[in-house]
Image: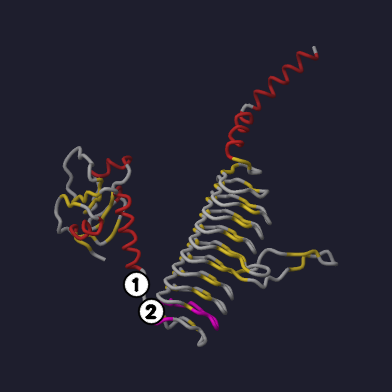
């Protein structure tokens, strides 16, 4: 994908300062930009790189005052961050214009799919599955029986989708993720050994869900593990059987959610949070990183700590906790003086 400066300016509603015919074919960070690339300056911490970057075009704020002349072509815009994000999206869309079924792939004859599908090498789709319009399935993906994948979804290399999974429209699933594996369920048998509890449910993803790499979402024992529309899940997240997650909730990396827990809409869950099973978390709850949630909570709360409590209560407790050595020392001295 190649653009001239005046074309970029039209795309981001900016004004060119310099050579409007200079071309770029890639994007780069301003600190290590190369000739033929476009960068942006959105953070004052990086101002110094404006004068040393080798990028051909740099997007800057419309009211930015230069300290000295620059060689690069500049495009002045109202918000450099949003303008660059728009260009990132444009380049990503260009990368997704793949079509066709690779000859080294395997699609069962009972599978229904559209002509505009992309199905990469060594990928497999088993019988009675349905794949929507403009779906991109990259290499080495496994899709089990009776799976539904909605329009415009992207499945990156190495994803494993077990049977009966439902994936909505405009979803993105990154490499290494497993959807629909058995939940972690065992009972002690009469012989004292662990006996596996087989899971007969599935996983359902709503529309516009994005799941990071190497995440695991277990199918339900019965019924469905449900990830609602608009949910965004980071890398290395574990979601157990029969969990439900409400719309537009975001979950950072290394979170673990135990079985049959319900999480509301528009929640924000920080990295390395652990949430116990069979709990109910309300809407618009923020859980700070590394917290451990061991009981249910209502809506519109901020939680922190292990076990997690309200954020303000945690901060008040921490004031005393960090002074605990001084308090103990004073107490020891008091006891010593009393004994004497």
Within the magenta stretch, is there residue 121?
A: yes
Q: CA distance from mark 1 to mark 2?
A: 10 Å
Q: Which residue is mark 1?
A: 97
Task: Determine whether, in the image, residue 309 is placed left or right of residue 106.
Answer: right
Where does the image place residue 302, in percent across and percent down from the top left? 56, 43
Identified at 21% across, 51% down, the residue is 75
Task: Determine whether, in the image, residue 37 is placed left or right of residue 214.
Answer: left
Q: Quadrant of residue 104?
A: bottom left
For the residue pair 23 and 209, the one nearer the viewer reads as 209
The magenta segment: 114-130
The secondary structure that most of the magenta stretch takes on is loop
For the residue pair 245 and 173, the one nearer the viewer reads as 245
Within the magenta stretch, is there residue 264?
A: no
Q: Which residue is mark 2?
A: 116
Closer to viewer: mark 1 or mark 2: 2
Q: Residue furthest bottom?
A: 109
Dot 1 falls on a residue whose secondary structure is loop
């Amino acid at each position: 994908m190649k653009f001239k400066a005046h074309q970029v300016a039209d795309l981001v509603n900016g004004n060119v300062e310099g050579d409007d015919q200079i071309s770029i074919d890639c994007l780069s960070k301003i600190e290590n930009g190369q000739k033929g690339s476009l960068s942006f300056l959105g953070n004052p911490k990086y101002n110094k790189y404006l004068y040393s970057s080798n990028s051909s075009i740099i997007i800057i704020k419309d009211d930015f005052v230069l300290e000295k002349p620059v060689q690069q072509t500049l495009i002045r815009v109202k918000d450099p961050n949003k303008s660059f994000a728009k260009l990132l999206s444009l380049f990503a869309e260009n990368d997704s214009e793949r079509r066709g079924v690779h000859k080294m792939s395997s699609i069962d004859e009972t599978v229904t799919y559209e002509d505009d599908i992309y199905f990469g090498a060594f990928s497999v789709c088993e019988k009675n599955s349905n794949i929507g319009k403009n779906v991109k399935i990259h290499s080495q993906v496994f899709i089990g029986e009776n799976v539904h994948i909605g329009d415009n979804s992207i499945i990156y290399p190495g994803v494993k989708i077990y049977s009966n999974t439902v994936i909505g429209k405009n979803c993105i699933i990154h490499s290494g993720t497993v959807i629909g594996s058995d939940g972690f369920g065992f009972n002690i048998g009469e012989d004292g050994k662990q006996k596996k509890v087989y899971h007969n449910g599935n996983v359902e993803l709503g529309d516009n869900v994005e799941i990071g790499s190497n995440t695991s979402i277990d199918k339900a024992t019965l019924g469905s593990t449900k990830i609602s529309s608009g949910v965004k899940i980071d890398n290395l997240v574990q979601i157990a059987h029969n969990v439900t997650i409400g719309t537009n909730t975001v979950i950072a990396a290394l979170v673990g959610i135990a079985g049959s827990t319900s999480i509301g809409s528009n929640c924000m869950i920080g990295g390395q949070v652990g949430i116990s099973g069979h709990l109910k978390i309300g809407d618009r709850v923020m859980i700070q990183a590394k917290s451990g949630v061991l009981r249910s909570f209502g809506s519109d709360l901020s939680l922190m700590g292990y076990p997690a409590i309200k954020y303000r209560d945690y901060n008040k407790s921490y004031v005393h906790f960090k002074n605990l050595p001084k308090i103990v020392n004073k107490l020891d001295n008091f006891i010593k003086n009393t004994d004497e």
